[in-house]
Amino acid sequence: MRDATLPCDTSWMRSPWAGATLRFIADPAAALDPAAVPDWPAWSPLDAVLARPAIRGRLGRWLAPDDDTVEMLDRLASPPQRLVLIPAEEAVDLVRMLAAWIDAPRIGTLIRRRDIDAVRAAVGENAFVFAERRAALFGRPGAALLAAVDAVTPMADPLDPARLLPRGAAALGLAIGSVPPGTAARLRLRRPAPLWATIVDHCRSDAAASADAWTCVRRLIRDQAPVWSTWFS
C-alpha cells in the first residue's frame, strides 16, 4: 500500500470484517481471473506468480492501484458496501441465488426436461432448488428492483438461461451501490471476469432499487448464515 493515510476513525480495525478489509486492500489478485490480464507474457506462468503471496500482492496493487484507500475504507462503514468483502466464489453463489429468486415464477413453470436442465446448469443446483421450493416463501423482490433489472437485462419469453446470472449480477451491483474507483478495479479482477464486470457496471446509486436489492441480499444472508454473516449484523 503506498503512503495512504488512514482515516482518524480506525474502529473498523476491531470489527469482524477487519481481516477481510486488509485482504481486499492488500491482495487484489487473490481471486484473479487470467482473462483480466490478457497480455500476460507466456514465458512467466501466471499460476506460479499467483501462488506466491508477496508477488501476487504486488501484481494486484499494480493492476488495481490503491490511491483511494481512505475512501474505500470510509465506504465500508456502510453494510451494503461490505458486500465487496465477501469471498469471490461465495459472492457468485449469492448472484446465483438472486437470479433464481428474481425469476422463480418463470423457473417454476418449466415443464420440458431440457429447459429444466438448462436452468439448473445456469444457476446451480442449490439456487434451482431454492427457486422451485422456497422462493415463494420469501415473497417477491421489490418492484423497483425488478423494474431496474428488467430495464438492463430483459428476460426473454420463453426463459433464456443465459440471462439469469446477468440479472442476478445486476441485483448484487445495485445492492452494493456506488463504489470508489479502487474498489471497482479490484472487483473487475475477480473470476469469472465477465460476471464481475456486470456486477461493477451496476454498482450505482438508485435509491429505491438499491434498497430493494439490499433487502433481498440481507434476507438471503440471514437464511444461509455463512461465517461472514456477522459483518452485516
Image: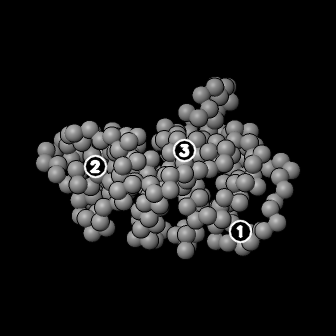
Asked whether the residues under the numbered discs 2 and 1 touch, taking CB atoms below 8 Å apart as contact, a structural biologist would say: no
Number of residues whose C-alpha sits closer than 10 Å to that of mark 3, classed few (under 14), some (14–19) or many (20 or more): many
Nearer to the camera, 63 or 183:
183
- Label 2 sits on what residue type? Arg
Q: From where the camera sits, is residue 30 visible? A: no
For image coordinates 55% across by 61% down, the residue present is: 80
Q: From where the camera sits, is residue 157 visible? A: yes
CA distance separating discs 3 and 1: 24 Å
- Label 1 sits on what residue type? Trp
Mark nearer the N terminus (2 vs 3):
2
Image quarter hosting the C terminus:
bottom right
Question: Can you tell which mark lies on residue 139?
Answer: none
Nearer to the camera, 26 or 188:
188
Q: Quadrant of residue 16?
A: bottom right
Secondary element under disc 3, as helix, strand or loop, is helix
What x and y, as percent, mark residue 8?
82, 66
Question: Can you tell which mark lies on residue 12?
Answer: 1
What x and y, as percent, mark residue 138?
31, 67
**40 lies left or right of 86:** right
Which residue is the site of mark 2?
120
- Label 3 sits on what residue type? Val
For image coordinates 25% across by 65% down, the residue present is: 136
